[in-house]
Amino acid sequence: MQYLDIVLVLVVAGPVLAAGAPALGFTVGAATWILARLASIAVERRIAGVGDVRRRLGVGVAFSMARVWVFAIAIIAAGVGGSRADGLTAALVIFGTFSVRFVISAIVHVTQKKGTGS
């Protein structure tokens, strides 16, 4: 369930592109999201190994800020490299997958808390 956002992007690619969504925008948004998620998995594993809480927090915040910049640059690049519709499509793909990831993360967090009895 933790990778549902990635699976969802890949599954909806065919129908969304067949419906006429700008291919460049969808591809840029989907590729950026998938690469950022893979990077976040690696960063989360690395953060888990850090003993110092301040350093763990610092790495997490730095990665989160860098990810926002990567998304913004990808959206702008799609809009400039293609059309405004491409930029909008990239933004919608990123926002949609972020929303799915946020809901999944909340569900997993609540489920884990109930499982530990906290």
Image (spheres, rainbow, N blue to C red):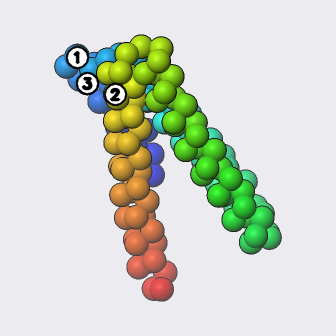
Task: Report which residue position mark 1 lands on.
Answer: 20
Q: Nearer the viewer, residue 55 or 7?
A: 55
Circles 1 and 3: CB distance less than 8 Å?
no
Residue type beneath disc 2: Thr
Name the secondary structure under disc 1: loop
Cα separation between marks 3 and 2: 10 Å
Along the polypeptide, which appears first: circle 1 or circle 2?
1
> In the displayed structure, would residue 21 be above or below residue 95?
above
Residue 10 appears in the rendering? no
Residue type beneath disc 1: Gly
Circles 1 and 2: CB distance less than 8 Å?
no
Task: Report which residue position mark 3 lands on.
Answer: 16
Q: Is label 3 or label 2 in front? A: 2
Cα separation between marks 1 and 2: 11 Å
> In the displayed structure, would residue 51 be above or below residue 61?
below
Name the secondary structure under disc 3: helix
Q: Give the percent coordinates (x, y) of residue 102.
A: 41, 56
